[in-house]
Amino acid sequence: KEVNASLEESMGCNMKDEDSVRDARDKLKTAISSAIAMGVSESDLMDAEIRRKKLHNTIEDLKGAIRVFCRIRPLNKREEGLGDSMITKQTDPMTLKVGANGEHTFNFDAVFTPGTQDEIF
């Protein structure tokens, strides 16, 4: 319910005003996080997540900022054979935790987990 209200509200924000767009994005992000914490599946939040990404991209465009993307590669056969394990965890579409215990957090414009080229693009 909170997600739908935030999603609806974000549709009326001034897309040429960075503060207005940032406020709408932050409200939507908070609503999405709350919904996930309450057990709502991420697939049910897809429309809200797409809108949040659009708002984020609009902010970046208004700022004229450089965008940074992160793609996590899968372990190769040699690494698997040596018993290595993944030390990265995508916590949301823009955040990556690195380290055996997730002790380092990094934010990007997008984080892509291991997958095929078709899945990523």
Image (spheres, rainbow, N blue to C red):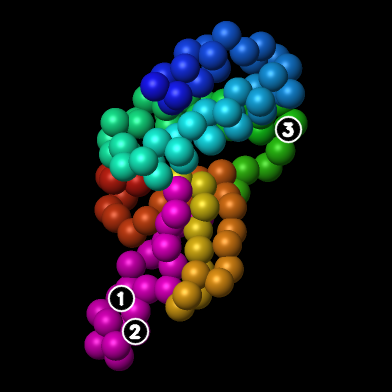
Indicate left or right for 4 with 94 as reference: left
User: What's under tag 3, amino acid-wise?
Assistant: Gly
Numbered tag placed on residue 84 in the rendering:
2
Answer with mark 1 or mark 3, whichever residue precedes in sequence: 3
User: What's under tag 2, amino acid-wise?
Assistant: Asp
Say which element carries label 3. Answer: loop
Q: Residue at x 45, y 45 (%)?
A: 93
Q: Which mark is nearer the camera, 3 or 2? A: 2
Q: Position of residue 111 (x, y in %)?
A: 47, 51
Answer with mark 2 or mark 1, whichever residue precedes in sequence: 1
Q: Position of residue 6 (x, y in %)?
A: 50, 21
Say which element carries label 2. Answer: loop
Residues under numbered marks 2 and 1 in contact, where contact means CB atoms less than 8 Å apart: no
In the picture, residue 22 is in which quadrant? top right
120 or 86, which lies in front?
86
Numbered tag placed on residue 30 in the rendering:
none
**Is the residue 90 above or below the residue 23 in the image?**
below
Magenta stretch? 70-92
User: What's under tag 1, amino acid-wise?
Assistant: Asn
Disc 3/disc 2 C-alpha distance (Å):
40 Å
Indicate left or right for 26 with 54 as reference: right
The residue wearing badge 1 is 76
The residue wearing badge 3 is 64
Q: Residue at x 55, y 17 (%)?
A: 10
Say which element carries label 1. Answer: loop
